[in-house]
Amino acid sequence: MARLIQIFEHERLTLLKNERGECLFPNELAKLYEFNDRNDNQYFTGIRDGIKFTNYVGVIQIGGLTIEILPKADKKKSSDKAEYEKWRNALLSMLAICRKIKVDSVSEASLNKRYHSLLEMYFEIFLDEVSGLLRKGLIKKYHNESSNTPALKGRIEFARNIQQNLIHKERFYTTHQVYDYEHVINQILLKALSILSKIVTNSNLKDRISRIKLDFPEIKEIQITKIHFDQLNESRKTIPYSEAIKIAKMIILNYSPDIKNGQENMLALLFDMNKLWEEYVYRMLQRNKPDNVSVDFQNSQKFWEGKTIRPDIVVTKRGNDKTETFVIDTKWKVIDYRNPSDDDLKQMYAYNIYWDSGKSMLLYPKIQEYPESFGTFHKGRVDGNACKLGFINVLDDAGKLDYGIGKVILEKLN
């Protein structure tokens, strides 16, 4: 039976039932430990009889269990289902804004649709894309093939020809060009479909996968690795494949089959919330900036020897008589506004010097109303050297992701 556990980042999940009656089974916990070991223990921390999640959000599926790890801008514990749904929808909207998922897939209609998990939404988008490609017709490509043929075509392979056709003089072992569906792009889609057929528990999706595979041309299923994706070259013909390939890459590279008994196959789709917040803020600034303001993302300069220094966002404001530069560094964490991290402040001091910025800002999600003002560094720039702790609401009054934060952030820099 399919189980769904929704949990917030930095919370714990153990073999013991929590306040919502949810827990892990021993075989599921073992699979999570194994997965985390293979990924340098970055996704969660092992604790006694369980795990503690970190700053990664997204979804993990192990056999019949699906775990949704959701962002939350405060540390208040909540078992209210509406609170989980609110942050789930906010995460989906943030993924759409940051182009981790198709924008038109995160409409009001799709958010109201009862997907069992975030993974099911990704699976359905992938199946929609592949179905569309099949309707239009998959592309063919030329490739070399070596085989016995009744007619001489291409280049004859003399050694193999003597070995295989010493008696059958009417055949020729040649290497020749073939124009068909047998190429890596189609093989990637087929591999992703095969993985989905093993891990999907939704009967409607399972049926749809089976029908799509029946419509797929006869091609070999090969082992796909990261190298195959790195070697792909986009062309005019392959542009329609881009969305399907993007999701196929997530499915294939994050899939962990259970070699021993095949019961606990695992698929994880996880995003670093710090990076997601950083990119979301950048895209909101781009959306709301006036014409005289430019916004640069992850600008870098040489710092020391081979090391570079790179703030999240650099804002440049051009006026009639002067140009001002502001540096923003986003932080997805809860802090005491009276006692910011020394490391964070030293980081902003360096950014001010290197980008010749008189004002910088550390930007955090807002938990409550905090006083905001620019604090002064005592050395560094003749024309002033200041940094502000800024706090911004992630959600609007209706509990949805706030798309107007770009304008508010720019106002905070003045």
Image (cartoon, rainbow, N blue to C red):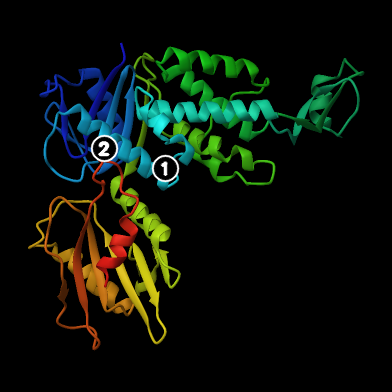
Could you tell me which residue is drawn at 34 percent across and 48 percent down? 276
- What percent of the width, then of the height, locates residue 33? 25, 30
Residue 269 is left or right of residue 158, and the answer is left
SS class, disc 1 = helix
- Tell me if mark 1 has few (under 14), some (14-19) or many (20+) residues whose alpha carbon lies within 10 angstroms of its own: some
Residue 214 is left or right of residue 198, and the answer is right
Q: Amino acid at mark 2?
A: Trp
Q: In the rendered image of this protein, does residue 216 appear above or below residue 357?
A: above
Q: Amino acid at mark 1?
A: Ala
- What percent of the width, then of the height, locates residue 253? 45, 35
Q: Which residue is mark 2?
A: 87
| Front-most of residues 218 and 292 | 292
**Mark seen at residue 292:** none
Residue 277 is left or right of residue 375, and the answer is right
Q: Earlier in the sequence, mark 2 or mark 1?
A: 2
Q: Which residue is mark 1?
A: 96
Quadrant in the picture for residue 167: top right
In the rendered image, which quarter contains the C terminus?
Answer: bottom left
Residue 196 visible? The answer is yes
Residue 42 visible? The answer is no
